[in-house]
Image (cartoon, helix red, strand yellow):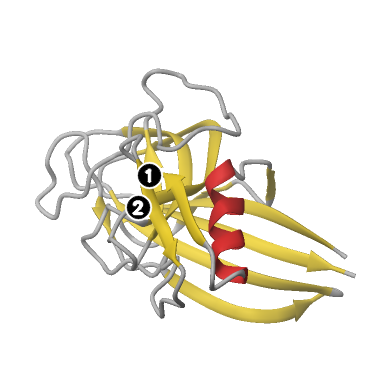
Amino acid sequence: MNLETYYRMLVHDPDGNLVKDTGLLLAGSYVIQFLEQLEAFLDADLTKEATDVVGAESLVSGGVAAPAFGRMDAPALNDVYGVVVGTNAGTTAEDNLNYALDTKIAHSGIGAAGCMNYQAVTFVAPHEDAGNIDLHITRTFLNETGGGITVKEIGIICKNSVDTKYHLLLRDVVADELVNDGETLTVVYTLRTTV
């Protein structure tokens, strides 16, 4: 059995018509914090630190089970964790030691330049699909800026309950995806196990 991760990006126009669908693309983007989080999740007695999104070492497990450990279910209007998008302005390559997006696009509900309106993260529970077991993690972003925004990187940041720090788990540098004013971008990460 192995675990694979895929992503898919869909762009819709203001009328809801599908403009572009990248299809399912293999993500090779797990960073070291993913395994550090998993280790802490699997060993409740472990005191564990990991590099957070500001580059500091922070506690992910303090030796006690935490009910909100590794949360990805960010609500609407929250760009701090969950599925996030960026412009990759510095063109930082994918690397095992990445701890943040290169240039994360901020949330704005009023259409501020260079920002997108972040909707809530949603999940499709694990289900069988053509002999695989898939879990979908989805978020939609609305461009209300009056101009286009080019997304060049995507990722998932989790929220830790131990001391409310944020840790990058996945980061993918993607083909430039132009999202015009009024369009929405939907990013779907699919975690898949195959026997």
Left or right of 169 in this view: 193: right
Residue 166, numbered circle: 2
Residue 88, numbered circle: none
Residue type at the position of mark 2? Tyr
Quadrant location of residue 43? bottom right
Quadrant location of residue 81? bottom left
Left or right of 132 in this view: 55: left
Left or right of 177 in this view: 140: left
Identified at 26% across, 49% down, the residue is: 182
Secondary structure under the numbered disc 1 in the rendered image:
loop
Q: Position of residue 130 (x, y in %)?
A: 84, 74
The answer to whether the residue labelled 2 contacts the one labelled 1, judged by CB atoms less than 8 Å apart, is yes
Q: Position of residue 38 (x, y in %)?
A: 60, 61
Q: Is residue 13 visible?
A: no
* Of 108 and 147, the residue lying toward us: 108
Q: Is residue 55 visible?
A: yes
Residue type at the position of mark 1? Asp
Q: Position of residue 121 (x, y in %)?
A: 39, 67
Identified at 55% across, 34% down, the residue is: 174
Which quadrant is home to the C terminus?
Answer: bottom right
Residue 52, numbered circle: 1
Secondary structure under the numbered disc 2 in the rendered image:
strand
